[in-house]
Amino acid sequence: MDYLNPALDLDRLQAEFGAERRLLIRDFFKPEVAEALARAVEAIDWSLCYRDAKGDRRLTGEQLRSLDDSQRAYLVDGIVEVARRQFQFSFYTESLGDALKRGDEGLLARFIRYMADEAFLSIMRRITGIPEVNRVYAQATMYAPGSFLLAHDDHVDAENRRLAYVINLTRQWRPDWGGLLHFGRPDGSVSDTFFPHFNSMSVFAVPQTHFVSYVPPFAQGQRNAITGWLIAA
């Protein structure tokens, strides 16, 4: 099954990507595919991922629900303290690679198998001009009030990340609710911003400095997506 919008102009997208090595593609999937993916992501029992003084941490939905108010406040204070001194993130996630390992047959597992297939990877190579891409890593992510991702460039020495992507699955969002993908210049200013339009795909070459802006307490919704990297194995 081909999930992509058949009206995509791949030659035009390739030209647009070449200028800044990044691109926001609107209406990337067929409408019925985007709707089905959005419903599947909305049903996830999310885990919280963040960092503490010892490294990356994850709390399952069950663990989060067991926390009382004082424990939640302590968790938030710890996240903020790390963010004052070093790289930090706080958002909700579900590994889609784990679904494949479990042998799940639901929509999200089938979708990741589609993304890992040669037909999809060849389209991404054509759009980006990066021929060595041949694997995919994927996770579902959700940004709620208090979520953020500080500036970084996605480079990891032990991995061969070539492209980062964000498949946006949020039906209604506002720019003053945060959760926007910003790209940075060497002087610390912002060079470009991608809004999470429903059924859009953000894709950019790695390394490239970027961050996701803080979602404030008054935000009325969740910014849902499927995110990850296209990798040279």
Image (cartoon, grey):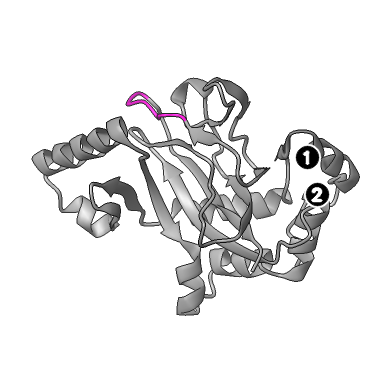
Specify few, some or many for label 1: CA neighbours under 10 Å numbering under 14, 14-19, or 20 or more. Answer: some
Q: Which residue is mark 2?
A: 127
Residue 32 point in image, percent of width and height = 68, 52
Query: Helix, strand, or loop for circle 2?
Result: helix
Q: Which residue is mark 1?
A: 17
Residue 29 point in image, percent of width and height = 72, 50
**Magenta span covers which residues?**
213-218
Q: Quadrant of residue 231?
A: bottom right
Q: From the viewer's perspective, tell me whether residue 70 is left or right of residue 57.
A: left
Residue 53: which numbered mark, if any? Answer: none
Q: Main secondary structure of the magenta part?
A: loop
Q: Quadrant of residue 75?
A: top left
Q: Is residue 82 above or below residue 120?
A: above
Residue 100 point in image, percent of width and height = 51, 73
Q: Do we see residue 192 in this rendering?
A: yes
Q: CA distance from mark 2 to mark 1?
A: 7 Å
Q: Is residue 17 magenta?
A: no
Residue at the image position 55 percent from the left and 68 percent from the top: 109
Q: Do we see residue 2 in this rendering?
A: no
Residue at the image position 63 percent from the left and 70 percent from the top: 113
Q: Amino acid at mark 1?
A: Phe
